Image (cartoon, rainbow, N blue to C red):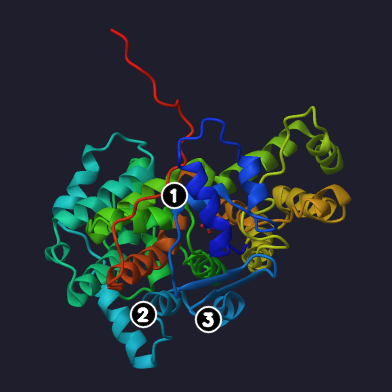
Amino acid sequence: MSHGDKSLELPFVEATQGNNGFDISKLMATTGDTTFDIGFANTAVCKSAITYIDGDAGILRYRGYPIEQLAEKSSFLETAYLVLYGELPTQEQLSTFNDDISHHMVIDERIREMFRIFPRRSHPMPVLSVGVTALGLFSEDTIGFTEEKLDAATKRLMAKLPTLAAYGYKNSIGSPTLFPDYSLSYVENFLRMSFGSVTRPYEFSDEVTKALDVLLILHADHEQNCSTSTVRLVGSAQTNLYQSIASGINALHGPLHGGANQAVLEMLDDIADRGISVQEYVNRVKDKNSNERLMGFGHRVYKNYDPRAAIIKKHADAILRGHDGNDKLLDIALQLEEAALNDDYFIQRKLYPNVDFYTGLIYRAMGFPTDMFTVLFAIGRLPGWIAQYREMQADPTNKIGRPRQIYVGEKERNYVA
Ligand code: MLT
């Protein structure tokens, strides 16, 4: 997507002059061969040095490092450090970062108590957002925007989000919470707090720990999507980091943003339950008169393939086949992928599996219910949200956000008594 300055300015001037007959297709025509994305106008423009995406070539890089290399060689905390601070950490920096995170994993007892007031079975995502807002109330680092305070808030949030997430999950199933265990890694700790209990220790599997670590890396940032631009917009009013991140969590909770992998699972379950063949389902998707849709295919940014999907597909097989040897839904997913990738209808429309196509299957095999899928997304996305917030605060030219509006309402009218 390229937006030359000239192509954007003229239509905006015309469009904001109260033209009732505003026609988006005319606006698109005036922009020549530049695609005018109405969503782009909604979120406004920003400069960022964190994540590079080339949607045509299927490239995703954090701070210049390709996602494939990070997923293979790095850990989530190392990638988080890179996203947050711009450079890969030295061994010593990584070990200090790890220690800082471990040190802050416990949450204040009063916040832990707070979980008892939520109704049983509350969705863990709004609970997470409330938990993050509450963290701000219990932290000294919410006032002022010094580097030191922002860094303290960064580490607190990175450390405590998995604890809050696990507590929200335990609350949703009516189970008692566990304290973090400092001897475990970031991901292990989260798995144990989510699935372990005092009487039944969580049984770790290297495949599950590795796959979850990779999934968090793949979600660490994705430039100006709905939740990230929300964090920036809310933060541009100098709202503190905790409240801005809570806003991002709320945005991510919307089904159109964080709910895609759940929709994929529902589609796969539906195909399995109805006992229809994959080809029949594909035919229905192509039929204009049918409501069937191919969930988890295509992406607003990627026009050839989503590089995250290719990485996670490898882990899907290891986790799902290991899970029960023969995974019916994975088989349907693989057949769907093959059928779609070899069908002109989908090829012409540039529809190929995106990251959400496999993540739901993997999370479910790990034992997470669908309500936890967006929570896992939020844990992964946290470094990106924080980095974007800090980048914006560090920019002296930054102003409070104010997305442009295109007025399409009535012209002036007279109030006649
Ligand atoms: C994301 O990772 O945030 C999603 O793919 C949505 C997006 O970037 O538009």
Secondary structure beneath label 1:
helix
The kind of residue tagged 3 is: Gly
Q: Nearer the viewer, residue 331 or 147?
A: 147
Work out whether mark 3 precedes mark 2 in sequence or the reverse, and give the earlier one: 3
Alpha-carbon span between mark 3 and mark 1: 25 Å
Query: Which residue corresponds to mark 2?
Result: 85
- The quadrant of the picture occupied by the N terminus is bottom right
The quarter holding residue 202 reads bottom left
Which residue is located at x 38 percent, y 67 percent? 388
Q: Amino acid at mark 1?
A: Leu
Q: Is residue 171 visible?
A: yes
Query: Can you identify the residue that label 1 sits on?
Result: 252
List x then y, in percent, for residue 164: 30, 55
Q: Position of residue 248 (x, y in %)?
A: 37, 53
Foreground residue, 60 or 102? 60
Q: Position of residue 350 (x, y in %)?
A: 76, 55
3 or 1: tag closer to the N-terminus = 3
Quadrant (top left, top right, bottom left, bottom right) of the C terminus: top left
Number of residues whose C-alpha sits closer than 10 Å to that of mark 3, classed few (under 14), some (14–19) or many (20 or more): few
Residue 203 in the figure: left or right of residue 262: left
- Is residue 173 in view? no
| Ligand 1 placement by image quarter | bottom right
Residue, disc 3: 64
